[in-house]
Image (tube, rainbow, N blue to C red):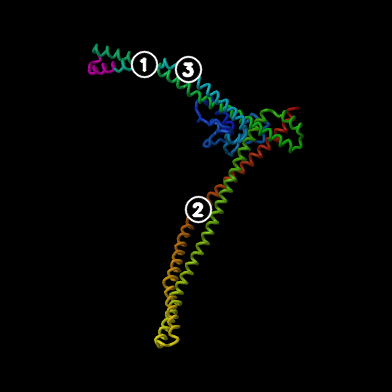
Amino acid sequence: MPEKLRSAYEVANERTSAPDAAAEPAPELASIPGPHPSPEAPTSGDIAPVSSASPDSLSTPDTEPTTSTETLATDVEILGKHYPVRQMINEIGNQRMRAVESVTASWKNMLDTPGKMRLGLAQSIAKGRLTRQERKAEAVSHLSDRNWLKRRRMRKLQKARDRFDRANAKYQGRKDRMAARKENVGKNVEQRRADYRKELRVRREAALGRRALRRELRAQDAGRFEARAVLKDIPKEHLERVGKLAATAYASERKAAQADKQKKSTVRNENRTLEAIGDNRRRMSEAANQAKEADKTVNEYETIRIPKLKDHLTELRDKLKDRTDDDQDRDSLEMQIQQTEEQIKIYEQREVPYWKQVALSNRQRVITLNKNHDALTANLSQNTAAKDTAVTDATAARATADAHKAELMKAAAEATDSAPEQNN
């Protein structure tokens, strides 16, 4: 039969109670209040299956619950913002013990330092003797193995090597013992921190389990004192099981809330991108219309207004030629000719270049806005994919949370139903 899946809490408890758990030092945590991740709890890369109660789980508490749904529940997810004062006080005591152990280790290392220096000197002397004997043995290496001088020097070389091995072993043993004293200070700190966090975890699971049972009893119209009496009658195994399921439901609900928040964020991003695309299209259309109107205005100046003024100027000059110098209308015609020339000059030197520049700048805006449209379209594709993923994750997380909540309610109901049977 395939091995049953174990809950994340059972895996974490096994890691905490393992004999070599303290042999792996965890990174130092700051001595501040608030929850810290446990080195024994599953990390973000260790996903352990979470327990779910079967219909007969409470009637046979020795069996391990199984489930096909996987989730992650770390100490931070279980404890949340609970027990911050206790953690702070425990951390203060832990740091105090660290200071005491560090001073003790330093004092013992100080007492061992003269012996370490003596052993180091003996090792150095043995090393020098070994080096001299190796040089002497190298000098007669060409001789036959039966030569008495070579045999004598090889015996001395072996004695020097044995003496160096003994001296080096003593020196390294003293050195390793002194280094282990300092390392054990940090390991003891982490072990005490992990043990206390495990204790808080057990308390949290028990509190969540009692709360779930109280809610179930209130749903059955039980009074406060009656609920307290029923809780006392529920077996410890059932309370622990309900507590683990309650902790699982609590962590699943937190994950579902986070996934729902992420889904809303991705939906907002997609809507903002859609609004940006719509605004970009509107501005691109306005720029194209303005460029078209500017081209139309330039064409009107060049094909209608300026030629008309030039024709009118030609007529005025022809009339001026027919007038004599003492004619009364000559001054009026000259004034009209000057005004017409100035108007043509304004159209050609100011109005036409201005509207050409307006058309050119708006066409450049259309090109820029079209590039922005391409970038926004690509961004929309990414946001849509992220939204679809977030919606899928949120749906799965919510389904998992609802399933765990249903399992918790079912387990709580079975636990409360089992209390009278235990009394009888």
Q: Quarter holding the C terminus?
A: top right
Q: Residues in magenta?
A: 132-145
Instruction: Please tell me which residue is depicted at 22% across the width and 18% down the height of the picture.
Output: 142
- Name the kind of residue labelled 1 in the image: Leu
Give the distance between the C-alpha atoms of the residues marked 3 and 1, in whole angstroms: 20 Å
- Name the kind of residue labelled 2 in the image: Asn
Secondary structure of the residue carrying numbered label 3:
helix
Circles 2 and 1, Cβ within 8 Å, touching? The answer is no
- Residue 66's tag is none
- Name the kind of residue labelled 3 in the image: Lys
Q: Residues within 10 Å of mark 2 (few under 14, many from 20)?
A: some
Q: Position of residue 375 (x, y in %)?
A: 48, 55
Which one is nearer the viewer's eye here, 155 or 306?
A: 306
- Residue 121's tag is 1
Determine whether, in the image, residue 304 is placed left or right of residue 60.
left
Determine whether, in the image, residue 291 is placed left or right of residue 63.
left
Determine whether, in the image, residue 353 is placed left or right of residue 44.
left
Mark 2 lies on residue:
379
Mark 3 lies on residue:
108
Q: Position of residue 246 (x, y in %)?
A: 65, 35
Asked if 225 appears above or below 368 in the picture, the reply is: above
Determine whether, in the image, residue 3 is placed left or right of residue 330.
right
Q: Residues within 10 Å of mark 1 (few under 14, many from 20)?
A: some
Give the distance between the C-alpha atoms of the residues marked 2 and 1, in whole angstroms: 70 Å
Secondary structure of the residue carrying numbered label 1:
helix
Q: Position of residue 276 (x, y in %)?
A: 53, 56
Can residue 265 be seen by looking at this rendering?
yes
Q: Could you tell which of marks 3 and 1 lies nearer the N-terminus?
A: 3
Check the image and name the residue furthest to the left: 143
Q: Residues within 10 Å of mark 3 (few under 14, many from 20)?
A: few
Secondary structure of the residue carrying numbered label 2:
helix
